[in-house]
Image (cartoon, helix red, strand yellow):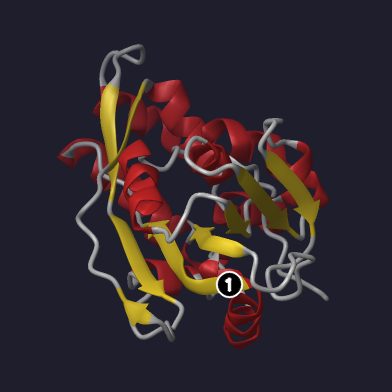
Amino acid sequence: MEFKDHFSGHAELYRDARPVPPADWFDWLAQQAPDRGLAWDAGCGNGQASVGLAAHFARVVATDPSAAQIAQAAAHPRIDYRVEPAEHSTLAAGSASLIGVSQAYHWFDRAAFHAEVRRVAKPGALVAISAYGNCSVSRAVDAVERHLYTDTLGPDWPPERALVDAGYAGLPFPYQRVDAPSFMLRADWNLAQFLAYLRSWSATQRHAKRTGVDAVANAAPELAVAWGDPDRKRAVRWPFFVRVGRVE
């Protein structure tokens, strides 16, 4: 099955430059799941969420159609990484207590994925989808970052990015809803780490291929002025939105 591959070409950068989902999110999910036997991390990428789930579940099956992304994932004794799409997994029927999707739901064939969820889910299994939007640092940094995000890279974002910017509003979620508390996604980064994150964007990579221009390098001097001391750690925050439901 073909998939939209926006990250295999810079999988190592993506692994090193992306924020890690909040630990209390995984704590809460484990408390809501019917048991802590098997969690499925669908569209796992480099396994950041897989490792978070492995802290609470006896076994995690982490799947992604990108072999390059899976190759960058951290080995863990409780994680079974598999190169396969979320829509057609090799999980046994009725085996998963938790089905999680982190920053990947917008890439899925959603109807096919939900059919697969119903096949692999145990009765009462939890389905948890999470993603994060555009970041915020400070008024000065944000002004430069927004110009890069919207004006420079706007044409290079895949259309699915709009679903993330909208907080997945209107996307199907055919499960019995479970109310979730708010969670904060934050990283304390210096300027070099922040620039690496901007380079990990799919739009940055696509822009460079299309134009031959490193848009982040062009924005870096202005970002440096806005940031101040480049070694200073600043709090980078993202809106972290979730949808949680139970398979009936």
Q: Quadrant of the C terminus?
A: bottom left
For the N terminus, the quadrant is: bottom right
In-front residue for pair 223/35: 35
**Visible residue check, residue 39:** yes
Percent coordinates x, y for residue 44 in the rendering: 62, 52
Label 1 crowd (10 A; few <14 / some 14-19 / many >=20): many
**Looking at the image, residue 31 lies above or below residue 231:** below
Is residue 101 shown above or below 113?
above
Q: Secondary structure at mark 1?
A: strand
Q: Is residue 75 left or right of residue 239?
A: right
Instruction: Say which residue appears at 43% left-offset and 64% top-offset.
Output: 128
Residue 219 vs residue 149, the one in the foreground: 149
Residue 67, percent across and down?
Answer: 82, 50
The x, y position of residue 180, in whole percent, is 24, 62
Evaluate whether residue 214 shows in this view. no
State the residue at coordinates (67%, 58%).
Answer: 6
Above or below, 172 against 11 in this view is below
Q: Residue at x 79, y 39 (%)?
A: 71
Q: Which residue is mark 1?
A: 121
Residue 3, image quadrant? bottom right
Q: Front-most of 6 and 126?
A: 126
The amino acid type found where label 1 is placed reads Ala
